[in-house]
Image: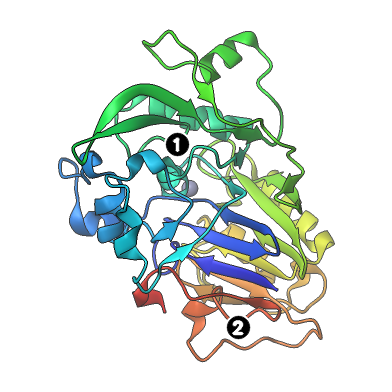
Amino acid sequence: MVSITCYGGVDEIGGNKIIVEDGDTRFSFDFGTSFGRRYDYYEEYLKPRAAVGLLDMLFMGLLPPLEGIYREDLLPRADFWARWRTAPRYRRLTLDGVLLSHAHIDHSGYISFLDPEIPVYSSLITAFTSKAMQDSGQADFEREVCYANLRDCQDDVLRTSKVSKRRPFIFLDKPPGESSARTFWNSIPFKTKELEVVTAEPQSDTVGSLPLRHFPVDHSIFGATAFAVETSEGWLGYTGDLRLHGAGRENTLRFVEEMRNLQPLALLCEGTRAGWRCEEDSGGRGVRECAGRGQAGERFGSGRFWPAQCGAFACLSRDRAGNRAQPSGAGQRCLLAGGYVPGVAGEGTGHPEFS
Ligand SMILES: [Zn+2]
């Protein structure tokens, strides 16, 4: 049984945190900042308090209460999790990795809060772009995607320490070859010591124990990558953000053909502009191509795929008999979280308003 739980990216643009569980493997497609929810409470000069670590983030619902996946140095108290263990969405979880589709903050930003031992799988360009964004931006604990600036706790207040840990990135396409590139990757501006790397970087063709494939796609930032993971129920695809009207259009088309060959059980598809009336030059065109233009699913060859709008995401799914799957009683918004895709079940979405 495969479980897919959306902790972000539903009924909003970006903020994707889609956790997939299958046997002993658990991973997340992206772990981004939910801008809409964040700006309900904060704005440019009003930010979550770094001195209280995860407290504001969980209290405001910006992060789901998932004990075991976050940085321990951001816990202001040793008994921090005790108050959350009775929360409706609380659960213990571990992650074998984050599959990062691209360097836009609404897909990458809240990797900042994850345990720095969790590997991040991305293209080389996505990793380096994320590093450049962190190096050149203001010090901000919401922007520690590539390396975590660890905090010490003194009198229940978190203060910046001198220790930084680089997350173990797995470069999916190629390693940094040039020595200057390695120097860039292994250093922080204005600091002389190298970043500490927590764990050895594992193979790039699996996440946990599941086979992993990656595909370059076209988007408004270089390095965008789509993924396919072979679960115990079949291939599961994830587009990240993609489009068909840019210079990398051929990459998106190639990805669509590759997915057709894989005959996936489901494709989690970017759908910010999805819809059958979307403009020809909009990003929705890429989504529409993936959706097989709505009815026949000819792009996937089988004629057994039907798209369903899911907030910012569309899910294309089929059942094993080739029959059209029906949304669960909870409605389309829950289709990624329970019942819509046969063989795939979830444990509810990350936020009460999505349940
Ligand atoms: Zn994007």
Q: Quadrant of the C terminus?
A: bottom left
Residue type at tag 1: Val
Q: Which residue occupies 33% across, 64% down?
A: 84
Judge whether 328 appears above or below 64 on screen. Answer: below
* In the depicted structure, whether residue 191 falls above or below residue 111: above
Residue 22 in percent (x, y) is at 68, 64
Instruction: Categorize mark 2 by other alpha carbons within 10 Å: few (<14), some (14-19), many (20+).
Output: some
User: Camera-side residue: 216 or 210?
Assistant: 210
Earlier in the chain: of badge 2 and badge 1, it is: 1
Label 1 crowd bin: few (<14), some (14–19), many (20+), radius 10 Å:
many
Residue 239 visible, this orientation = no
Residue 81, by quadrant, is bottom left
What residue is at 45 percent from the left and 36 percent from the top?
145
Say if 166 sits above or below 311 in the image. Answer: above
Left or right of 193 on screen, residue 225: right
Residue at the left extreme, as displayed: 45
Task: Say if disc 1 is inside 8 Å of ligand 1.
Answer: no
Q: Residue at x 80, y 81 (%)?
A: 320
**Which quadrant: the N terminus?**
bottom right
Horizontal and vertical percent for residue 177?
Answer: 69, 16
Do callouts 2 and 1 mark residues in contact (Cβ within 8 Å)?
no
Secondary structure at badge 2 equals loop
Q: Which residue is mark 1?
A: 145
Q: Amino acid at mark 2?
A: Gly
Distance, label 2 to label 1, CA atoms, is 33 Å
The residue pinned by badge 2 equals 339
Query: In the drawing, what numbered circle is on residue 302?
Result: none
